[in-house]
Amino acid sequence: MKAIEETLKHCRKCEMKTTHQRNTNKTGLVMLLVHLVLIAVTWGVWLIILAIWTLLNQRVGGWICSECGNRRFL
């Protein structure tokens, strides 16, 4: 499920606090249950795979100022 996160951050280009947005993936309760079942069935091996997957797909910023469009990567 795709979603848009919003937060207030200081924009270096606008020189003021503005709304920043970024795309994100939201998972629901069903996927949490699936992961818990997979962890139990595979005796914890799935937890290692999930940890590696999470580290490799970690977001590195991607916040965009809603006023000027400046990207913020921190």
Image (tube, helix red, strand yellow):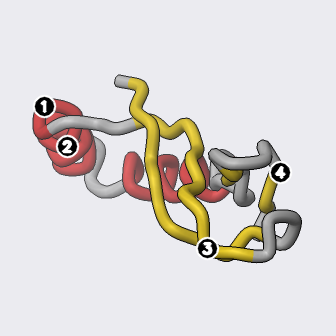
Name the side, left or right, on which 55 lies relative to 51.
right
Nearest to the observer: residue 28 or residue 8: 8
Residue depicted at x 18% and y 47%: 36
The tag earlier along the polypeptide, 1 or 4, is 1
The kind of secondary structure element at disc 2 is: helix
The kind of residue on which mark 4 rests is Asn
Residue 35: horizontal and vertical position, in percent?
25, 41
Where does the N terminus fall, quadrant-wise? top left
The tag earlier along the polypeptide, 4 or 2, is 2
Mark 4 → mark 2, Cα distance in angstroms: 34 Å
Q: Nearer the viewer, mark 1 or mark 4?
A: 4
Mark 1 → mark 2, Cα distance in angstroms: 5 Å
Res. 33 image quadrant: top left
The kind of residue on which mark 1 rests is Val
The tag earlier along the polypeptide, 3 or 2, is 3
Mark 4 → mark 3, Cα distance in angstroms: 13 Å
Question: Which residue is tagged 2?
Answer: 32
Q: Nearer the viewer, mark 3 or mark 2?
A: 3
